[in-house]
Image (spheres, rainbow, N blue to C red):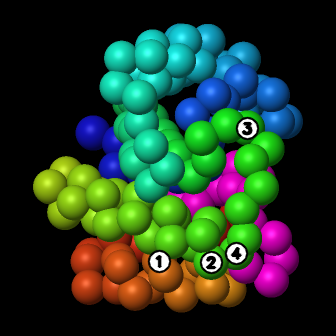
């Protein structure tokens, strides 16, 4: 069982065009297709979460922070939706006994001045779990 999960940010209408997401889509074409299908069926909102598992067992935790790609939000709003999704991720971390959660900085659109606040929120929400968090 792969216990390493990769956290990424997506919008509800994500097209996997940023370099990192495009790379994921090229490696696993069904990732983008499955996400579009999920959004069509479930209509996720800001602050929701979606987990996708590759055929090899690699899990990607999608933090849905925007309704549409490129949506403009202030820092507080982005952090608020991130925290909502992170609380949902905490349940998954605990239920699945996830050992590692990597926040791929290339896949999050936080500005430089928001990164420390993001890390504080991660510590606040996940600090009492056994998961080891990394950022790269």
The residue singled out by tag 2 in the image is 76
Please report whichever mark, 1 or 4, sits nearer to the chain's N-terminal start. 4
SS under mark 3: loop
Determine crowd level at label 3: few under 14, some 14-19, many 20+ residues with C-alpha closer than 10 A.
some
Question: Where is residue 57, by image quadrant?
Answer: top left
The residue singled out by tag 1 in the image is 122
Location of residue 15 in the rendering, given as x and y in whole percent from the top left corner: 71, 24
Determine crowd level at label 1: few under 14, some 14-19, many 20+ residues with C-alpha closer than 10 A.
some
Q: How far apart are the two marked residues, 1 and 4, measured between alpha carbons?
A: 16 Å
Give the residues drawn in magenta, as a range: 101-114
Asked whether residue 93 appears in the rendered view, the answer is: no
Q: How far apart are the two marked residues, 3 and 2, measured between alpha carbons?
A: 18 Å
Q: How far apart are the two marked residues, 2 and 1, measured between alpha carbons?
A: 15 Å
Q: How far apart are the two marked residues, 4 and 2, measured between alpha carbons?
A: 4 Å
Determine crowd level at label 4: few under 14, some 14-19, many 20+ residues with C-alpha closer than 10 A.
few
Q: Are marks 3 and 2 in contact (CB under 8 Å)?
A: no
Number of labels in the image equals 4
Q: How far apart are the two marked residues, 4 and 3, measured between alpha carbons?
A: 16 Å
Q: Nearer the viewer, mark 1 or mark 4?
A: 4
């Amino acid at each position: 069982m792969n216990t390493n999960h990769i956290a990424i940010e997506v919008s509800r209408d994500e097209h996997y065009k940023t370099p990192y997401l495009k790379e994921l889509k090229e490696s696993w074409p069904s990732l983008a297709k499955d996400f579009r299908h999920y959004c069509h069926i479930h209509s996720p909102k800001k602050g929701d979460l979606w987990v996708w598992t590759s055929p090899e067992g690699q899990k990607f935790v999608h933090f849905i922070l925007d309704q549409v790609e490129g949506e403009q939000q202030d820092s507080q709003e982005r952090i608020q939706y991130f925290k909502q999704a992170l609380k949902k991720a905490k349940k998954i971390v605990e239920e699945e006994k996830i050992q590692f959660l990597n926040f791929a900085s290339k896949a999050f659109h936080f500005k430089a001045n928001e990164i420390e606040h993001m890390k504080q929120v991660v510590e606040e929400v996940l600090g009492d779990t056994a998961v080891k968090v990394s950022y790269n």
